[in-house]
Amino acid sequence: MLINNKTLSFPLYIIGLSMIICGIRWLIHPEPWMLDEAANVERLGMTFQDLFNEEINSTLPDYLIQIYRFFGFWVLIIGFFITSLSRNIIANNIGTPLLAIIGFMMFFGMYLGYTFIPSSHFIDLMWILFACYAVSLYSYLKLTK
């Protein structure tokens, strides 16, 4: 495997771009909780239709939209940070903190995913992004030796 700055930065750029796309999806989807419907229904133990039919839950859809919009906004912002910082990592001396923070974010995200929504299709995406992270981490370790 040819190790250079591109094998370090491009996989991180893919991680950031994936987060940007996910963030935008959560921001613009009319019912963002439906993007992972199967895992959410499994976690709730009922369908969203059953949940929303109860009179006490009549305002729940608006509340969920609000929460998912904020979540999407933060995922989008983190994606922008990762894509912008993934260029020239070696030249800017930000490799160690950037890779540590992204690694922590991904490992903790995977832990939360398996703990709370193990049937989520986002876990499959996380494994793909873990492969990207591993390439970047390996490249960084080889380039900084």
Image (tube, rainbow, N blue to C red):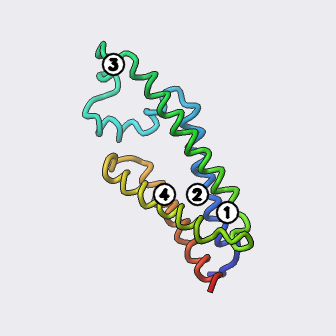
Gap in angstroms between the C-alphas marked 1 and 4: 15 Å
Q: Mark 2 points at which residue?
A: 15
Give the quarter of the figure containing the C terminus.
Answer: bottom right
Q: Where is residue 104 in the image (x, y as percent from the top left)?
A: 47, 62
What mark, if any, has residue 105 been given in the picture? Answer: 4
Gap in angstroms between the C-alphas marked 2 and 4: 11 Å
Q: What element carries label 3?
A: helix
Q: Mark 3 points at which residue?
A: 57
10 Å neighbourhood of mark 3: few (<14), some, or many (≥20)? Answer: few
Q: Name the residue under label 1.
A: 86
Decide which of tag 3 and tag 1 comes sooner along the chain.
3
Q: In which quarter of the image is residue 43?
A: top left
Q: Is mark 1 on a helix, strand or loop?
A: loop
Q: Is mark 4 on a helix, strand or loop?
A: helix
10 Å neighbourhood of mark 2: few (<14), some, or many (≥20)? Answer: many
Mark nearest the camera among 1 and 2 is 1
Residue 127, compared with residue 143, is above or below; it is above
Given contact means CB atoms under 8 Å apart, are the residues at marks 1 and 2 in contact? yes
